[in-house]
Amino acid sequence: MQSIARNPRRSLFMLRTHIRQISVLFFQTSVFFHDANFAAFRFNSINGRDRFEIGSNPIHPVEEVLMWKKVLGIGVVTLALVAVVAAFVTPTNAQATTNLVDTVRQATAGFQDVKAAEAAGYQLFHGCVSGPNEGAMGVHYVNGDLVGDGQIDAQKPEAIMYEDQNGTMRLLGVEYVVIADAWNAKNQMPPVLMGQLFNYASAPNRYGIPAYYYLHVWASKNNPDGTFSDWNPQVSCEDFTGEHSH
């Protein structure tokens, strides 16, 4: 069940397969009724009472009702089976995500409180980062071990971004970071995460680290400039004083 949920494409394929199988079963049932001369419908008046005739076999009204109950029952069973199959292959597992934003929200669900991020190995990196013209990136809490491992894992962002709002740190999103030399040593192409190509920052830079690849994901705060843009015009560094917020 979990392995199916992790792969939405496989789930969709299985859903279509099961529905197709159920449709074949329903068709075969319909053929059975057809072979029993349940095909061409017409009404005849026999002895002053309407009797329902299917094919060449006249059917008493009571038999007609029973027949339609069977047909209706088959239809209900078919719909129920489709519902069960759909529920089975629908990605309900927490790891079943359809895009990078959903993945980030899942990965940072436990980091609404900055203290939880610190407990997980993230530490304040420099100060609040303002944009060259407007907006900001906010305050970065960085996991140095993840930055230095030369890998990208959607479930383990290297940096978590917060904004100080009246002394309370509010979660904004994440930044994925990998040192360029470490990545290039094992890969011929720049990193791409769930369809999103990383940006490149050369050295020397304002952060004092080697050249690196990076990608911002504004998963917890809307960015009118784009979900993967560097700067968010709705974020400010004005309230951040460098003191530990809560």
Image (cartoon, rainbow, N blue to C red):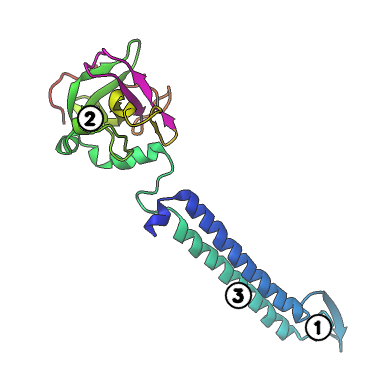
Q: Residues within 10 Å of mark 1 (few under 14, many from 20)?
A: some
Coordinates of residue 89 in the picture (x, y in percent): 46, 58
Neighbor class of circle 2 (other Cα within 10 Å; few <14, some 14-19, many 20+) is some
**N-terminal of the two: label 3 or label 2?**
3
Give whichever of discs 1 and 2 has the lower sequence position. Answer: 1
Camera-side mark, 1 or 2: 2
Region of the chain picked out in magenta, as a range: 196-218
Dot 3: few (<14), some (14–19), or many (≥20) neighbours within 10 Å? few
**Residue extending furthest bottom?**
47
Disc 3 on helix, strand or loop? helix
- Asked if residue 26 lies in the magenta stretch, the reply is no
Q: What residue type is labelled 1?
A: Arg
Residue 73 shows which numbered tag? 3
Is residue 207 covered in magenta? yes
Name the amino acid type tagged 2: Gly
Going 75% across and 76% down the picture, which residue do you hit? 34
Between the C-alphas of marks 3 and 1, the distance is: 23 Å
> Which residue does the image show at 53% across and 54% down from the upper left?
13
Residue sitting at 63 percent across and 65 percent down?
23
In three-dimensional space, the C-alpha distance between marks 1 and 2, rounded to whole angstroms, equals 83 Å
Secondary structure under the numbered disc 1 in the rendered image: strand
Name the residue carrying label 2. 148
Which residue is identified by label 1?
51
**Is 197 left, or right, of 172 in this rendering?**
right
Q: In which quarter of the image is residue 28?
A: bottom right
Q: How far apart are marks 3 and 2 (CA)?
A: 62 Å
Taking the view exactly as shown, the residue that stands out farthest to the left is: 243
Residue nearer the viewer, 68 or 200: 200
Q: The C terminus appears in which quarter of the rendering?
A: top left
Left of 147 or right of it: where is 22? right
Give the number of marks.
Answer: 3
| Amino acid marked by disc 3 | Gly
